[in-house]
Image (spheres, rainbow, N blue to C red):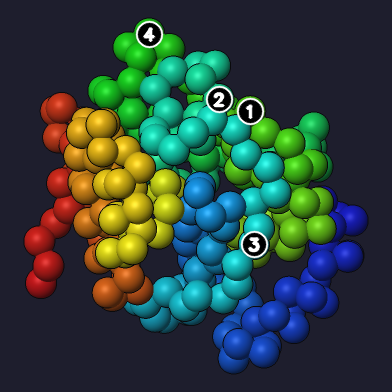
Amino acid sequence: MRGARERRSEDIKKLFAEAGLDYPPAQVLLRVFKKDDLLELWVRPQKKKKFVHLKDYAVCSKSGVLGPKHQRGDLQVPEGFYKITWFNAHSNFLLSMKVSYPNPSDRIRGHKRDPGGSIFIHGNCVTIGCVPLTDRWIEELYLICLDPHWRFGNKTLVHIFPTKMNTAGMDWLKKEFAEKPKLLSFWEEIKEGHNRFEETNIPAKFTILKNGTYRFRKKR
């Protein structure tokens, strides 16, 4: 990791300075859109509630299809709402950040004995269910996520969606997956979390019901 910091510190300082933001931010949110091969970087400035869109990264390899992950070996990238739980500076994929899959919703809805795990955002541009970036960009993103965790103790949030869940995105999903009503129902469910953030730039809080459904708190 020392090499990554030596190579990327000046780039990170410049990125934040050009956006008029102090470094490190108080917290980071990553939004992944699978169909679009896109990872959005959002940061919450110190002493602020709202996140700011700072940068986009290309997801450079993919596996599986659109839809949530249910079991080990299905090659799926999860869909839903997660956090980074571990920063691995000695990863086989240069650097990696562990996503909190399976979350309680996944455990209820997925394979009861083995829903799978070991989902990471990492480098090396290969995947069997993870979210890979090129080595150049994982070094930058890893440090941007790590430093607020060290400084403020705030976990990086990770929201993963099949695509942008705006009107155009939902219309496309409804057309392409018209014969999969259960899948469309799941996407309608997580769409609320997507849209609430789009409206407010604040992640919507939620609880998970006994059947695994996300229930988002009412707007104030």
Q: Amino acid at mark 1?
A: Ile
Q: Earlier in the sequence, mark 4 or mark 3?
A: 3
Disc 2 element: loop
Q: Looking at the image, do the residues carrying marks 1 and 3 touch, with CB atoms under 8 Å apart?
A: no
Between 95 and 135, which is closer to the camera in this rendering?
Answer: 135
Looking at the rendered structure, the kind of residue marked 4 is Arg
Q: Is residue 170 above or below residue 106?
A: below
Mark 3, residue position? 57
Callout 4: helix, strand or loop?
loop
Callout 4 touching callout 2 (CB < 8 Å): no
Contact (Cβ within 8 Å) of mark 3 with mark 2 = no
Front one among 57 and 211: 57
The numbered mark, 1 or 4, whose residue comes first in the sequence reads 4
Q: Residue 59: where, in percent of width, then height?
A: 64, 51
Asked if one can make out residue 149 in the rendered structure from this viewpoint, the answer is: no
Residue highlighted by disc 2: 75
